[in-house]
């Protein structure tokens, strides 16, 4: 099994229902990072948001190792400017200790602020996710501790948004954000955003590199099968996670659009 580099190919592996899970798949080295990235768009984001890059002293060795591995002259910012993916570095204070986020270059965040996450362990980084502490935190910690170089693992998730912005940092209320969305226009006004995430350990520093590659597509541009799958997320998440994703504000429109697509009443 592998992960693609588009919403259409990522959706089959994205969690749209049921309890939290890592949903990891093993990737070949050649599948780690996207080829032919849009570097101009990456550069514009980093130029406009210098706060998007933060590296703590304890991540400096890993930063240099990663840059050397990728043949990039510079540090974490230059690595992220040279690829489509955002890069995060996770390090331990000592063997057996929890991994903390100690370095990051994030041009395209999905509604989170890097300054609020830096230096914190994984459970605190994922604190806003409903059920993470109870359902996933221990498993994530075990996986990170057991991850060995050169293995690469990947996973994906999916969000329904009313924007295709690469930097998704909404400031308006969700009821305002989705007010214009109807079942009739959902194909043009709703977007599916996937985060293609990978994890690998650096052999020398023993830090873990976590990458996030953003893919997005208008709902109307997806296949009937993809629309049906993302529609499962309306009832698939618990109330807490559904509310965090603003699902109550687009659920009716998405469900009706998906029903019409299934009945052949909406053009793709």
Image: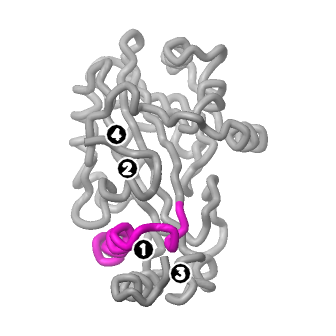
According to the picture, the residue beneath numbered tag 1 turns out to be 243
Q: Which residues are magenta?
A: 217-238
According to the picture, the residue beneath numbered tag 2 turns out to be 156
Residue appearing at x 59%, y 76% in the figure: 189
Mark 4 vs mark 3: in front: 3
Q: Quadrant of residue 239?
A: bottom left
Q: Earlier in the sequence, mark 3 or mark 2?
A: 2
Q: Earlier in the sequence, mark 4 or mark 1?
A: 4
According to the picture, the residue beneath numbered tag 4 turns out to be 154
According to the picture, the residue beneath numbered tag 3 turns out to be 186
User: SS at mark 4?
Assistant: strand
Residue 241 visible here: no
Q: Earlier in the sequence, mark 3 or mark 1?
A: 3
User: Relative to 108, is 188 above or below?
Assistant: below
- Residue 203, percent across and down? 36, 13
Q: Nearer the viewer, residue 187 or 110?
A: 187
- In the picture as drawn, the residue positioned furthest to the top comes out as 204
């Amino acid at each position: 099994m592998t992960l693609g580099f588009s919403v259409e190919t990522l959706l089959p592996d994205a969690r749209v229902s049921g309890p939290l899970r890592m949903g990891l798949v093993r990737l070949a080295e050649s599948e780690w990072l996207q080829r032919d990235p849009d570097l101009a768009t990456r550069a514009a984001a980093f130029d406009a948001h210098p706060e998007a890059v933060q590296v703590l002293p304890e991540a400096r060795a890993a930063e240099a190792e990663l840059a050397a591995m990728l043949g990039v002259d510079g540090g974490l910012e230059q690595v992220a400017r040279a690829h489509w993916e955002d890069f995060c570095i996770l390090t331990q204070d000592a063997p057996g200790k929890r991994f903390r986020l100690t370095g990051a270059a994030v041009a395209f965040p999905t509604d989170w602020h890097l300054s609020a996450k830096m230096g914190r362990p994984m459970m605190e980084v994922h604190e806003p996710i409903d059920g993470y502490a109870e359902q996933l935190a221990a498993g994530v910690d075990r996986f990170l501790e057991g991850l060995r170089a050169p293995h690469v693992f990947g996973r994906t998730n999916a969000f329904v948004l009313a924007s295709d912005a690469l930097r998704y940092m909404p400031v308006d209320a969700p009821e305002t954000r989705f007010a214009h969305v109807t079942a009739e226009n959902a194909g043009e006004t709703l977007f599916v955003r996937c985060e293609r995430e990978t994890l690998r350990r650096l052999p020398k520093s023993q830090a873990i590199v976590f990458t996030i590659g953003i893919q997005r597509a208008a709902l109307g541009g997806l296949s009937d099968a993809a629309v049906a799958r993302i529609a499962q997320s309306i009832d698939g998440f618990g109330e807490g996670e559904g509310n965090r994703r603003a699902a109550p504000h687009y659920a009716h429109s998405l469900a009706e659009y998906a029903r019409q697509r299934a009945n052949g009443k909406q053009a793709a």
